[in-house]
Image: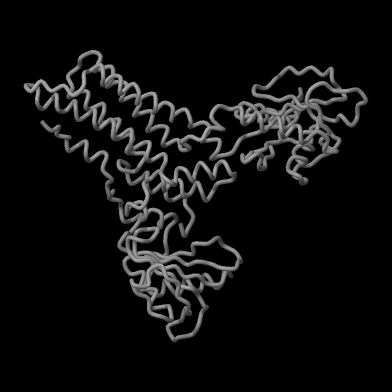
């Protein structure tokens, strides 16, 4: 006898077109935007997408374009209504189904001045297109099945990647590695749920494609695999947002000098007066393929001065949230005792150019750039020592993914407990359906229009 997979389960794992309020995105409109960054450059691209993309292009372009020209470059001019030349451009049409959005699309490659690109866009809008909203091209790619929601989020992550590691992680997600893993979870849960449904629908048949103990074992393995994916969230978050490195210490130990030395420019004010830095100061740097958020803090000491006290309070808050703390100490005052010692810290002795004796430990002179190579080496080793950063594995980078996986794991655990306790299988199916719906939220097959709008609103215009 063939197992009948319930319709409700099929609907969960089959890609769906989600009805989105047209006040946010009107899919019947032909949209256009400048797809390259603002400013001057060699080339700017104006992208047109929608059911009338070719018709709009043919109104403004000096040569006719047809579906037979798909993926072919055509040279011509953008013309005003009275046939005046706006710019010489290259036009590339993409027929429906073979474009980024899945719709009829035309790209106009014009000269890269911001004024000329705006003029070309204005002419396209006069031809019948409407201005695209942030992320609307990728939204249409998602709605037309060219990307799932996890891949769509990866598009923005690739654009915004600030390090090689972040770019690699985003590219892996864009290529579908996370989506493939989630779909495998869905497939296995669906197969188990189908067996439970068969027990419900045909109790008199005595069907037993697997014993309850075997199903518990399969679910336990799935839970382990989902928990392994959940465990990657912290490293994924760090790759996405950057590694926070905080410089702390007593006043006048050289924190600002070290920040300037690491950034190789005068970012922080440096004076001989203790307490110059009253607030946190941050900037960014790259190290070993990682993106580092570097934070200089106010010197920590006992004080009654209100502004300085607030700065010290903020220093403690930054220390607690930082991934790594560089604790600077003055090599000319080695007997200094600190009433506070931050967690996750690396002790760095500064001002070794002012002492004659050898300093034990990591010693530098920020002012003269002595020992910086050793400091950067130790800092990179500390970053790489965090579990998982050197493994080539799928990772999750969004809180949305983490929350959905947590729901799925909890639902499967309830299903396992029910199987062990001999609960009727129709109740267990509810738990597995909840897990499937949660996983569907990662891929975008079970999300609300508010979530979709919020995700795509973070994108830049033209993407």
Left or right, 29 with respect to 232, comes to left
Point out the residue furthest to the left here.
Answer: 204
**The one of 446 and 336 positioned closer to us in this rendering:** 446
Q: Number of numbered discs present?
A: 0
Residue 441, quarter of the rendered image: top left
Question: Which quadrant holds residue 33?
Answer: bottom left
Residue 191 position, x and y percent, is 24, 31
Asked which colour scheme the image uses, the reply is one colour
Q: Which residue is more in the foreground, 42 or 204?
A: 204
* Image side of residue 332 versus residue 292, left or right: right
The residue drawn where x is 71% and y is 19% is 340
Check the picture and name the quadrant holding the N terminus.
Answer: top left
x, y percent for residue 226: 39, 28
Picture residue at 35% right of the left edge, 53% below the top: 146
Residue extending furthest toward the top: 421
In percent of width and height, residue 218 lies at 30, 23
Q: Is 455 on the left or on the right of 254, as rendered?
A: left
Occupied quadrant, residue 71: bottom left
Rendered residue at 34%/43% (across/down) = 444
Q: Position of residue 210 (x, y in %)?
A: 21, 22
Figure check: 234 above or below 445? above
Left or right for 257, reference 432:
right
């Amino acid at each position: 006898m063939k197992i009948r997979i319930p319709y409700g389960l099929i609907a969960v794992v089959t890609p769906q077109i989600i009805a989105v309020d047209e006040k946010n995105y009107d899919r019947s409109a032909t949209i256009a935007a400048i797809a390259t960054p603002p400013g001057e450059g060699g080339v700017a691209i104006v992208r047109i997408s929608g059911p009338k993309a070719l018709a709009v292009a043919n109104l403004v372009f000096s040569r006719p374009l047809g579906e037979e020209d798909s993926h072919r470059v055509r040279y011509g001019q953008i013309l005003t209504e009275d046939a005046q030349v706006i710019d010489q451009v290259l036009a590339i049409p993409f027929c429906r189904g073979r474009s980024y959005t899945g719709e009829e699309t035309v790209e106009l490659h014009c000269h890269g001045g911001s004024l000329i690109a705006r003029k070309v866009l204005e002419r396209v809008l006069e031809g019948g297109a409407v201005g695209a909203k942030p992320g609307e091209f990728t939204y249409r790619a998602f709605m037309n099945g060219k990307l799932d929601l996890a891949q769509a989020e990866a598009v923005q992550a690739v654009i915004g990647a600030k390090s090689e590691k972040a770019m690699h992680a985003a590219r892996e997600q864009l290529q579908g590695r996370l989506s493939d893993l989630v779909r495998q979870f869905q497939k296995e849960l669906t197969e188990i749920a189908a067996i439970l449904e068969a027990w419900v629908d045909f109790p008199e048949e005595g069907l037993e494609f697997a014993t309850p103990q075997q199903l518990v074992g399969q679910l336990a393995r799935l839970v382990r695999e989902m928990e392994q994916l959940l465990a990657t969230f912290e490293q994924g978050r760090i790759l996405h947002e950057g590694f926070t490195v905080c410089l702390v210490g007593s006043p006048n130990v050289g924190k600002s000098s070290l920040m300037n030395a690491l950034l190789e420019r005068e970012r922080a004010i440096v004076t001989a007066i203790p307490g110059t830095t009253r607030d946190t100061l941050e900037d960014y740097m790259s190290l070993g393929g990682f993106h580092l958020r570097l934070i200089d803090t106010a010197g920590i000491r006992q004080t009654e001065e209100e502004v300085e006290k607030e700065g010290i309070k903020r220093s403690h808050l930054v220390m607690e949230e930082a991934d790594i703390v560089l604790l600077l100490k003055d090599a000319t005052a080695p007997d200094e005792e600190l009433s506070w010692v931050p967690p996750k810290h690396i002790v760095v002795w500064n001002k070794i150019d002012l002492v004659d004796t050898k300093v034990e430990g990591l010693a530098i002179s920020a002012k003269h750039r002595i020992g910086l190579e050793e400091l950067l080496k130790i800092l990179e080793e500390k970053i790489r020592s965090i579990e998982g950063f050197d493994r080539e594995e799928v990772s999750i980078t969004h809180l949305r993914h983490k929350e959905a996986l947590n729901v799925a794991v909890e639902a499967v655990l309830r299903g396992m407990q029910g199987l062990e306790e001999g609960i009727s299988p129709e109740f267990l199916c509810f738990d597995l359906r909840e897990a499937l719906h949660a996983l569907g939220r990662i891929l975008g097959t079970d999300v609300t229009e508010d979530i979709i709008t919020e995700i795509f609103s973070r994108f830049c215009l033209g993407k």
